[in-house]
Structure formats: C-alpha cells, structure tokens
Image: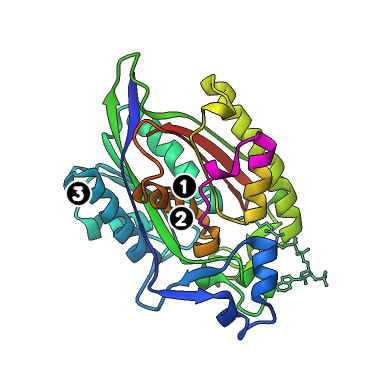
Amino acid sequence: MRRSILIGTGSALPERALGNEELAKQVDTSDEWIVERTGIRNRHVADSHETTASLASDAGRKAIEAAGIEAGSIDLIVLATATPNQTFPATATIVQDELGCNGGIAFDVAAVCSGFLYALGVADSMLRTGMATRALVIGAETFSRILDWEDRATCVLFGDGAGAVVLEAREQDGDEQRGILTTRLHADGAHNQLLFVDGGPSTTGTVGKLRMKGREVFRHAVVNLSDVLKEVLDEAGLSTDDIDWLVPHQANARILEATARKLNLPPEKVVMTVDRHANTSAASVPLALDVAVKDGRIREGDLVMLEAMGGGFAWGASLIRI
Ligand code: UT7
C-alpha cells in the first residue's frame, strides 16, 4: 500500500512578540479577560519585511532540513493560507522559488483555519495516486494584516506564523502502520457569514477586515470537532485510548478543553500552544505539531490526531502514525 509518511516538521514566527498587557494599552481589554476567556497570553506580529511567503519559506526550509532531504526533491507544494502575499500568483509559487524546488506542482488552498487539514488531505491524495512523491505542506498566515485593531472582540485572538511538514510517498507492507491513516473534511456554507472578511477582489476591491460572531462559532466548533474526531477514529477502526497526542487548531483553550472532554481524552495528551501563539489560523496545527516534535513529546510510532475548524464553516481531522 502506498502511504504518505511524515518525515520532517518545521515552523517560523515573526520576531515581534505582543503580550496581552501591551495590547491592553492599544485597545479596551485586559490580560485578565483574554486569559480567562481564551487562554491566550502572547502572539507574534509580522513586521513589514515579514510576509506569509517569508514565514512559509522559513518553516518549509526547516521542515526540509529536519527531513534530511534536498529541497530540489520536493515535487509538490500545497500552501494553506487566507492571507496570501498577493491575490495571485499562489503564495506556494513564491515559496517554491525561494526554496529552489521549481518545476513541480505548487498551489494554495483556502480553507481558513482548517486550511492545513485540507492541504494535508489534498497532498496525501496526490501522493497516494502517484502524482507526486515528496510534498511540502505548509500553513502560513499574517492575520495581523486583516485584523480590525479597534475591534477588541477579534484583534486579541489572532497571531502570525507558519508551520510545515514534509510528506514522502512510500510503499508499505501490511504490517507497517506509519503515515496518514485517515483524513475527513467537511464544510457547511450555511454559516459562511459568521466568520469572514468584509472585502475581496471581486466585491469591494479592498483587502477587508476579519469579522466574527465569536459565541456562535464557539458553539459549532465543539460539536463539529468532536463529531469529526469520532468519524476519523471509526474509519480507522481505533478508539480514543489509542491516541497518543491530539494536536488541535489553537483557537481558544476552552474549545480545546471542551473537545478533549467530549472525547474522554486526558488533557495531558492535548498539545496546547494557544497561550504563546494565539490563533494563527492555517498555521496553528503544523506550528503546534512542530513544537511537540521538537520538544520530544511526539516521537516516531506515536498516533497523532490533528483537527481544525474555522470560517466557511470548514472543518476536518486527520489521523497520522508518525
Ligand atoms: O479559528 C476560527 C475559529 N474561531 C473560534 O473558534 C473563536 C470562537 N469563539 C471564541 O473563542 C469566544 O467566543 C470569544 C473568545 C471570541 C469570546 O468569548 P465569549 O465568552 O464568547 O465572550 P462574548 O463574545 O460573549 O463577550 C462577552 C463580553 C461582552 O461584553 P458584554 O456584552 O457582556 O458587556 C464583550 O463586549 O466580553 C466583552 N469582550 C471583551 N472584553 C474585554 C469581548 N472582547 C473583549 C475583550 N476584552 N477583548
């Protein structure tokens, strides 16, 4: 059986860190409110020289180094972002040129906070069907550029960053269990105006700002995420007890805790980085994954569940044997 094996991870953050106290000097909020309602203490904010493409390239380069391969051997780049450098070309092509792996396939995927899960699903399908052999899958965002910095209900929640993984297609015999085992993706467009940007090339002609009905998103997130996690486990013939690590989208510590509780998953198995990075949209899952790989928590052989939910609504989960 041909499977996509995860052989390297990497991540990148803008240099500038912005803590809650400093943010509270700019907008009517407090460290206490933000920590209590979200678990966020800090986020990173891109400077003018840092872009989605530069963060993505940085994360991609580190993932390639960790995999111990030549950048030129990457024949597929799928980059998830809702904040591309330009409307077109795809930011993936800028990264491709930056890393020196021109000639293969390169494109962006737009599924907002679930973007990395969608990108992973697409890349996995392309690797398994033989369209490519080595894929760089990236989630990268500069949400600071689309935040309304006067709207305290949203600007405190997000941060910038990038995370990446290298996947390699390998033939495995029946006993070998490494690789992406199952991915399930969903969207429900009926809710596309609960979390959106109020601009775009085909409507206002401006970039626009992020708008969100936070409480409604929260309610749907817990239900949708626990459903898709159960769906993926059923599909793989596994149970919650088999999961070594849950690497969730880092939107809000309360969503993470509620989802883990619904699954009966002990909190110590949940990788949580929302306190340091806030919600980095498509970057949040690969960024958290890289943190837990680099600090030695996630090791080869571990069964890792990734999940995310966001604007669209779009959501999904993926089960990987590292
Ligand atoms: O990644 C995509 C997915 N996104 C999400 O998953 C986000 C999901 N939603 C959430 O995480 C939460 O709904 C929020 C963190 C956004 C908000 O928490 P909440 O407990 O749902 O608060 P709320 O929006 O109902 O607001 C409660 C109060 C309001 O004041 P009143 O009307 O009760 O007087 C807000 O005006 O908190 C006020 N508030 C703030 N106060 C201080 C809202 N934002 C702030 C703030 N600082 N930054």
The residue nearer to you, when weighing 185 against 46, is 46
Relative image position of residue 50 (x, y in whole percent): 36, 72
Q: Earlier in the sequence, mark 1 or mark 2?
A: 1
Q: What amino acid is at disc 1? A: Phe
Q: Which residue is mark 2?
A: 283
Secondary structure category for the residue under label 2: helix
Does 265 appear above or below 20?
above
Q: Quadrant location of the N terminus?
A: top left
On the question of residue 188 being in view, the answer is no
Q: Is residue 181 left or right of residue 264?
A: left
Q: Is residue 107 left or right of residue 254?
A: left
| Distance between mark 1 and mark 2 Cα atoms | 7 Å
Relative image position of residue 281 (x, y in whole percent): 53, 57
- Mark number, residue 71: 3
Residue drawn 31% across and 55% down? 93
Q: What amino acid is at disc 2? A: Ala
Task: Note whether ligand 1 is within 8 Å of mark 2.
Answer: no
- Is 72 part of what is drawn in magenta? no
Label 2 environment density (alpha carbons within 10 Å; few <14, some 14–19, many ≥20): many
Q: Which residue is mark 1?
A: 116
Q: Is residue 240 left or right of residue 245?
A: right
Residue stretch rendered in magenta on the structure = 260-273
Q: Earlier in the sequence, mark 3 or mark 2?
A: 3
Q: What amino acid is at disc 3? A: Ala
Label 1 environment density (alpha carbons within 10 Å; few <14, some 14–19, many ≥20): many
